[in-house]
Image: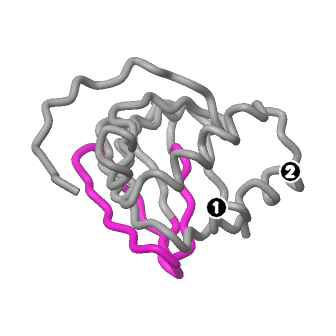
Amino acid sequence: MSRKAKILLPQDDTSSLLGGLRKLKLNSNETNGDIYLVEGIMPKGSNVPLHVHTKEDEIFHVLEGKVELVLGDETITASEGTIIYLPRNVKHSIKTLGDQTARVLNYVIPGQNFEDFFNEMNQEGKDISSEKRAEIASKYGITFL
């Protein structure tokens, strides 16, 4: 497969998931499945529960606000400018701290599997049961703890 550099315009597709919003920046189809890039917009009280990915690595880049991340057995506070590399198979969670909305760029590598997971979760809506969430996640190599 021939690989070429591309200039890509950010997507303008916003959807809700797990108490916050995800704003699509790069869809994995544009990168041959290599990268999926979303901006997480996490209002006060947003929390992505503890989970593990078996198929992808992630990079979090905090653009605004303050978040708490559980990374394996460590808990850190990250603020604007912090970049966190998270390899697959490491349990993690992220939640907003304080009263300010947090904005976090989330790079997922490779991207296609995780994008498909997000899309299926979004179709289920915000009132998804924990059982249904676990069932969907399992299909994509993700386990909520």
- Numbered badge on residue 140: 1
Percent coordinates x, y for residue 127 in the rendering: 83, 34
Q: Which of 142 and 63 lies nearest the eye of the viewer? A: 142
Out of 103 and 126, give the one closest to the viewer: 126
Task: Please tell me which residue is depicted at 86% across the width and 50% down the height of the picture.
Answer: 132
68 within the magenta span: no
Frontmost residue, 138 versus 45: 138
Locate the N terminus by quadrant: bottom left
Q: Nearer the viewer, residue 120 or 86?
A: 120
Secondary structure under badge 2?
helix
Which amino acid lies under the numbered mark 1 shown in the image of this protein? Answer: Tyr
| CA distance for labels 1 and 2 | 13 Å
Q: Position of residue 139 (x, y in %)?
A: 71, 62
Report crowding for label 2: few under 14, some 14 to 19, many 20 or more residues within 10 A (C-alpha).
few
Residue 55 is situated, as x and y percent measured from the top left of the image, at: 50, 70
- Which residues fall within the magenta stretch? 70-96
Label drawn at residue 132: 2
Residue 76, compared with residue 115, is above or below; it is below
Q: Amino acid at mark 2?
A: Lys
| Residue projecting furthest to the front | 1
- Would residue 10 appear left or right of 38 to someone viewing this image? left
Q: Position of residue 111 (x, y in %)?
A: 42, 53
Q: Main secondary structure of the magenta part?
A: strand
